[in-house]
């Protein structure tokens, strides 16, 4: 019964184009469709059902014991012919709760994602660090998957991904792609990065630069001639640079500014909006490209000057978040009220749209 219930819940959610599904004791399953969370037409979940649903996805005794000890678990789950899911299981108010993120097995091409041409050009780079940032659910993984797939279809490369968990399943085309999942194939991002340089990679995807050890290893990999792609939960380029520098102890920050100035190639910051012209989502994207002026700002700790550099270098492919949002409004893709609420400078955007 539980086997069928889990499959039925997730299949129904995918058919409804849900991005997320939530299992909580005392409630029916809930799904998020185009930012709105609604109840599904299934019975209320009790504590026994929640445990049975999770045990089906974690049948190995050691993984179940690890969950009971840590009270949290991240993993992936797949239903053949339906979809793959990124899953977090946790406790709330003493009961098991499960959050699913739908991962579409079909990797959408860049042209379908409304990504600027500058992002396509970044896939031609032979080395350096590219960061895709944004809040949870902002489409970072989708953008990275499109970039990796572009390289996979175009060049003969060795691409290694370190993910927690694996989201998009790549099929090697012209490139050879290896995907390693934290917890299953490698103990941690930092451990995987320590060894990946001995595996002859051209491109390395790190799911998230979440701590000092991982960040340091990713920057070192970029310094040694590899193209490294990763993510951070930051909302714009200046905040991204400051977050990386602040991870390091104060006596190392001058050194890391110099290293980052030499290796960083671009920061892509995304915010997703609900479309008003048709069902679906569309990203507003800030792009900072590391020109000599940007590198000098990083090196000399003049991060506050970067927004002005972005605004005055549109011809190079840079764009601010608010400029991207404004274009989405003017093209009739998103609602004006939503646009202003998510803008970096709401009053300024309001005036620009009224002009």
Image (spheres, rainbow, N blue to C red):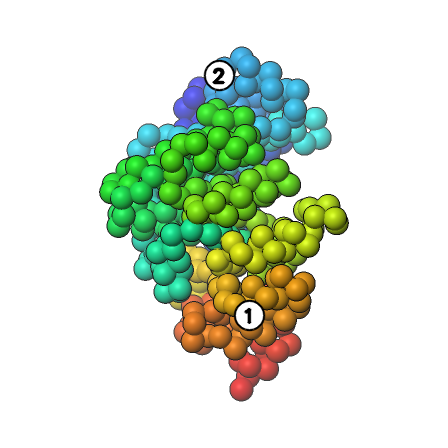
User: Horizontal and vertical percent for residue 71?
Assistant: 65, 26
Report the mark closest to the observer, 1 or 2.
Answer: 1
Q: Residue at x 71, y 30 (%)?
A: 93
Label 2 CA crowd tier, 10 Å (few <14, some 14–19, many 20+): few
Which quadrant, please, contains the N terminus?
Answer: top left
Say whether residue 151 is left or right of residue 56. left
Say whether residue 207 is left or right of residue 308. left
Secondary structure beneath disc 2? loop
Q: Identify the image quadrant of residue 102.
A: top left
Q: In the displayed structure, would residue 318 be above or below residue 253?
A: below
Which is nearer the eye, 22 or 130?
130
Q: Residue at x 48, y 30 (%)?
A: 195
User: Horizontal and vertical percent for residue 243?
Assistant: 65, 52
Q: Does the CB distance between marks 1 and 2 fall below 8 Å?
A: no
Q: Residue at x 40, y 64 (%)?
A: 118
In this view of the protein, can residue 190 be seen by the observer? yes
What residue would you read off at disc 1?
A: 293
Q: Residue at x 36, y 61 (%)?
A: 121
Q: Identify the image quadrant of residue 47.
A: top right
User: Horizontal and vertical percent for residue 123?
Assistant: 37, 54
């Amino acid at each position: 019964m539980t086997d069928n219930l889990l499959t039925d819940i997730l299949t129904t959610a995918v058919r409804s184009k849900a991005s997320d599904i939530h299992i909580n004791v005392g409630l029916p399953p809930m799904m998020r469709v185009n930012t709105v969370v609604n109840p599904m037409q299934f019975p209320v979940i009790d504590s026994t059902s929640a445990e049975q649903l999770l045990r089906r996805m974690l049948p190995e005794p050691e993984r179940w014991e690890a969950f009971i000890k840590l009270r949290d678990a991240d993993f992936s789950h797949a239903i053949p012919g339906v979809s793959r899911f990124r899953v977090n299981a946790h406790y709330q108010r003493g009961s098991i709760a499960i959050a699913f993120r739908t991962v579409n097995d079909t990797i959408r091409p860049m042209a379908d994602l409304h990504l600027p041409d500058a992002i396509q050009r970044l896939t031609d780079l032979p080395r350096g660090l590219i960061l895709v940032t944004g809040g949870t659910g902002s489409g970072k993984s989708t953008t990275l998957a499109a970039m990796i797939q572009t390289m996979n279809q175009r060049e003969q490369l060795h691409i290694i991904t370190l993910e927690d968990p694996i989201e998009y399943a790549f099929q090697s085309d012209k490139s050879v792609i290896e995907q390693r999942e934290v917890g299953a194939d490698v103990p941690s991002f930092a451990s995987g990065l320590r060894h990946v340089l001995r595996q002859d990679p051209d491109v390395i995807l790190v799911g998230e630069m979440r701590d000092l050890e991982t960040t340091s290893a990713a920057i070192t990999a970029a310094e040694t001639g590899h193209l490294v792609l990763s993510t951070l939960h930051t909302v714009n380029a200046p905040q991204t640079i400051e977050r990386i520098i602040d991870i390091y102890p104060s006596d190392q920050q001058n050194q890391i500014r110099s290293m980052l100035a030499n290796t960083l190639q671009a920061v892509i910051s995304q915010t997703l909006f609900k479309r008003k012209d048709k069902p679906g989502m569309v990203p507003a994207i800030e792009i900072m490209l590391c020109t000599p002026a940007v590198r000098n700002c990083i090196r000399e700790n003049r991060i506050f000057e970067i927004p002005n550099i972005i605004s005055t270098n549109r011809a190079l492919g840079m764009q601010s978040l608010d400029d991207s949002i404004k274009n989405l409004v003017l093209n009739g893709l998103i609602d004006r009220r939503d646009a202003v609420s998510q803008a970096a400078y709401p009053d300024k955007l309001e005036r620009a749209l009224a002009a």
